[in-house]
Image (tube, rainbow, N blue to C red):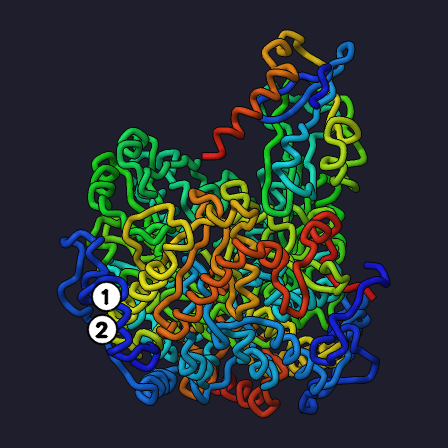
Amino acid sequence: MRYLPKSPSERQAMLAAVGAHSADDLFACIPAQYRLHRPLNLPGPLSEAEIVAWFRARAAENSLGFTSFLGAGVYNHLRSVVTDTILQRGEFLTSYTPYQAEISQGTLQAIFEFQTLICELTGQEVANASMWDGSTATTEAVLMAERLTRRHRVVVARTLHPEYRHVLATYARNLGIAIEEIDYTESGQLDAEALAAAVNDETAAVVVQSPNFFGAMERVSELAGMAHARKALLIVAITEAVSLGAVRPPAEADIVAMETQSFGMAPSFGGPYAGVIATREQFVRQMPGRLAGQTTDSAGRRGFVLTLATREQHIRREKATSNICTNQALCALAATVHLCLLGKEGLRELAEQNLAKSRFAAAELARVPGVRVPFSAPYFNEFVVELPRSVRIVNDALLREKIIGPLPIGPWYPELTKRGLVCVTETTPRSEIERFAAALRCALAQPI
Amino acid sequence: MYPTDFRYTKEHEWVKVSGGTATVGITDHAQHELGDVVFVELPKAGAQVTAGQSLGTIESVKAVSEIYSPVSGEVIEVNPVLASAPEKVNEDPHGAAWLIKVKLANAAELPALLDAAAYEKFIAESEKGNLV
Amino acid sequence: MSDAIKKAGRHVTQNEGLIFEKSAPGKRGFELPPLDVPATDARAALGEEYAREAVEGFPEVSEIEVMRHFTRLSTWNYSIDLGMYPLGSCTMKYNPRVNEFVARLDGIATEHPFQPQAVSRGCLEIMRTLQNCLLEITGMDACTLEPSAGAQGELTGLLMIRAYLENKGNPRRKVLIPDSAHGTNPATAAISGYEVENIRSDANGQIDVAALKEQVGDDVAALMITNPSTLGVFEPRIGEIAGILHERGALLYMDGANMNALAGISRPGDFGVDVMHVNLHKTFSQPHGGGGPGAGPVLVKKILEPFLPVPVLVEKNGQPILEMHRQTSIGRVRAFCGNFGVLVRALAYMLAYGPGIRQATEDAVLNANYIRRRLEDVYELPYKSASMHEVVFSDARQKRNGVNTMDIAKRLIDYGFHPYTTAFPLIVPGALMIEPTESESKEECDLFVDAMRSIAEEAAATPELVKTAPHTTRVGRLDEVAAARKPILRWKP
């Protein structure tokens, strides 16, 4: 077997050296009734070419050749081949967590750069080395707020991504954290008045997303004031990190929980991505996740180490800030490389292209009879459309044209059954947007 | 070696009483076991502490230790230098690196604590035990 | 930091600064294709309230500078591609490159988790095949591929235990965890709302069964074990342990971090485990990537199947589909269905082996035992029970000269190896925890043994050399105390 570097004679020699007659002797420590006496019933073994063929066959059963207008927390963006080239260097790909700093300076310096970039993007003072994804980063931010305020209620916008809210509810249920959801107004934004009424002296945090699940910008500054008036913290979740190229960062937030998938990570059917938490320096000791810090060696040379480790599970065990151990380091590296390639000007230009494409699409779709764009709040690259009939049925027709149409949001918002979420990024050619509008016009013209 | 006007706990805290005020710190033995102290987490003035219960933590790079209060009462002062200079705990654990001052609620708690001689004996015996 | 900070040397590739220090206005690393729709002014589109000026402090560098920067950084890292990582319970094995290739295929990397299931049949088949392989390897009944890492798998498992017990009328209060357990176990128990109670190990480093009998009361929900343990030793009384728990209505959780000792040889489902996780970034070859990503699929017995997190992969008319709702589910532990790219790589690994995975396990255990045999005369072996895929020594002998496990580990770097796991498990003071994995040849094992034997000699004859190691790295031992006292966590202009 090509992954095993032993010849049969070497195995024999080693077995002899340990005093075993056969490999079976090595497992004498397992009681006989628990030892398998049959080979496992598993597919394979396959050669390299057969493995490739198997996965190509699976790829052919997916959406190759389709044009997608999906966003909702996972975004199609351009990725440079340079990112992948760097990620595939064995020294990054196959290296371990940088606990032994002297031989992990590459990883540690890259993490330090990632932390810096995230701070610049989000307007916060410190950032960690990554969380599993945006949804768990948001949940961990809530737990962090609970520790900081010693309060046990959170007020959550209904415009926070439904799956993020579901994760938060799953974690919160066992920790005695009460969640109250606040609805949205006809602009598509959170109902600020209802929020102000709901925040009280038991509130640990207010949780909002901006741009929100409908694609609409939330009024972060105003919401921060409402939270802070009752000494609650403001947590802002961001699912579309590219928005920060054109949108004011949530500097008034106490904690930012962001998904960085848009920076160099392929959609890959849901993961792996990289979440991150960024916050104020004064909260750093309650922040979960690894942190890379700058220091020197005895000769005064600059180097980097994992620091403030007493927050983490391997030292603090049941009193740790989180149970996280393995994070998303390589994905965070992808984000770091991607952001360095884009740079200041590239990120701004990228964000502006997204603004342009989505506005063009919204105008094209709004021209289709029966279609409207119901929410009035400013948006980045996603917006909600309302159709005169079931989004699902329309999508079936679009699928036949190899178009993956608006994401129906009725399943999460039962009051919005004929509405769908449309995302358009710099990767969607104008011709495809026009084809989408034409196909939609056609589908709606069909008798029901 | 250990100040005779202090009393000690088996968790390696010391307390010095003057009038109705108790000053609390950790012993030289404790700081030596911890190694370089990087952070001290203490209660705020006005908080209540209870004898035998945790009042905060002390961190080194690789370890965290609870600090158990030798006495009960209200915290009236917290040492301000430790936030910016936690290394003082290593340098002067019995003096400049006192942790908190407490308004003593119950002087009857004191006799149960060890005096300097008993504490030194306690350390010597536990170290012997460790050399198995 | 003061001006006294020096660079690492004169050599340009050893001297690489931060990317921000190479930045200058006007440089670009990536250009976008031209816009094919009318341009929009951000201010006009978003309004004054939301528009941003620019991301100040962001680097401006060219493509070649980015390539050189990260290439140079990479050369400062150790990696599996370079040599052995003898890290205990980490299972640092070879990361096959075909796995990287297939994960990047168009039609695999490009798929959106919300796209209609009708055009995701390939992804669903990948998930179904992987699930079936994991069920066969572990001998369990049902599976979720959703958890993002081992720790999240532990959380998922404990939440399912809680739901199961709640369904029976009482979630109970405590989880028992051995003092030898990985830190994520108690941390996870705390996040699932359970109290942690330690169960001690006996003189052989195994679960103290007498203590267990006393501690498993009506308020104990589960015992979390690692089997083989973090000492690399199989719990011979595991059947009895499972029996005690089940008798009292409690469940057995197994941390599957050490599956590299069992795959193809023994199945946790056969020895009484009710729920467990596996680490795809350990046993199943997902690259560590400097700290992640990984995945922690959870396998359960039938009794826990109703509580699986959503979405649940089920079969309908012979086709795999994702069921988004399940009344009895614990909920959701992350958005979307999991670290799919990691699942792809793990499946590619399994397809390469087929039933031959048994050979990998045999080689892993053989390597660990070989190393044990060749080092047990120079390093103290605190527990004499048979080792499986890892062996734990202690620094007791070297300590007599003031040399501890950390020092030995740092000196190992000078010999070209990554250190083993130091100071864990906690039940062995001064531990040296060594797991070679099956990826190491006899030659590599011999080189490792030679290095360790040489260091033992140095510890006796020239201990200062070991205590001040490493001597051959780009930077020496770094000041972790200063880093923790006055943390500098970002670059500032």
Badge 2: residue crowd in 10 Å (few <14, some 14–19, many ≥20): many
Q: Is residue A415 visible?
A: no
Task: Quickly name the residue at label 2.
Answer: C355
Determine which quarter of the picture holds residue A367: bottom right
**Where's residue A343, x and y in %?**
73, 78
Q: Is residue A282 visible?
A: yes
Near-viewer residue (A79 or B70):
B70
**Where's residue A85, x and y in %?**
57, 84
Q: Which numbered marker is on residue A365? A: none
**Where's residue B88, x and y in %?**
76, 37
Q: CA distance from mark 2 to mark 1?
A: 7 Å
Q: Residue at left 62%, top 73%? A: C76
| Chain where mark 1 sits | C
**Secondary-structure class at tag 1:** loop
**Where's residue C241, x and y in %?**
24, 41
Determine which quarter of the picture holds residue A5: bottom left
Q: Residue at left 21%, top 36%? A: C247
The residue type indicated by label 2 comes to Pro
Badge 1: residue crowd in 10 Å (few <14, some 14–19, many ≥20): many
The residue type indicated by label 1 comes to Gly
Up the image or down, C33 lies above or below A191; here it is below
- Where, quadrant-wise, is the N terminus of chain C in this rendering? bottom right
| Chain where mark 2 sits | C
Task: Quickly name the residue at label 1.
Answer: C264
Near-viewer residue (B30 or A253):
B30
* Callouts 2 and 1 close, C-beta under 8 Å: yes
Up the image or down, C139 lies above or below A55; here it is above
Q: Is residue A418 left or right of residue B45?
A: left
Task: Choose the circle earlier in sequence order: 2 or 1.
Answer: 1
Q: Is residue C226 left or right of residue A365?
A: left
